Image (cartoon, rainbow, N blue to C red):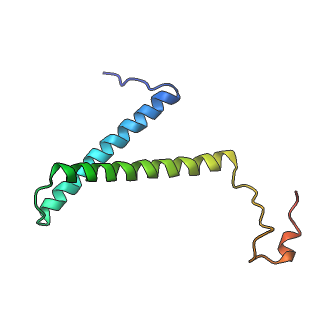
Amino acid sequence: MKAPRVEGRAGRFLLALGLAVVIAAVATLGLAGYWRLIGGGPMSIHGWIAMGLGVLGTVGLSWLLMSLAFRSDREGWDDQVDNRLDPGRDEADNDDLTY
């Protein structure tokens, strides 16, 4: 059976979102198993919700920050930085900048 092809930006987004949800579910179940292994009691529904939201939020924040870092690198946002107002730099260091 051939795997379905994901096309377009929306398709890649949905694929990545699905992957993030699967990772969050596996991490949540793993943490719950570890909790019971170390002697913790059974978790209530509120504990499951809190842990699931925490894991999903962490994965989402990591995904967002990494995508911003890749976008910044691709589009050159950090290529040239104006350091003229940096108090730790000497005036001689600013002479070679061209604007």
Q: Is residue 14 above or below residue 41?
A: above
Left or right relative to 27: residue 63: right
Q: Residue at x 25, y 48 (%)?
A: 49
Q: How many marks?
A: 0
Q: Is residue 53 above or below residue 88?
A: above
Pinpoint residue 23: horizontal percent, then vertical percent.
32, 46
Q: Residue at x 60, y 46 (%)?
A: 71
Q: Residue furthest front?
A: 46
Left or right relative to 18: residue 62: right
Q: Residue at x 13, y 62 (%)?
A: 37
Q: Is residue 80 above or below residue 25?
A: below
Residue 29 visible to the viewer: no
Quadrant position of residue 99: bottom right
Pinpoint residue 17: horizontal percent, then vertical percent.
40, 37
Q: Residue at x 75, y 71 (%)?
A: 86
Quadrant position of residue 80: bottom right
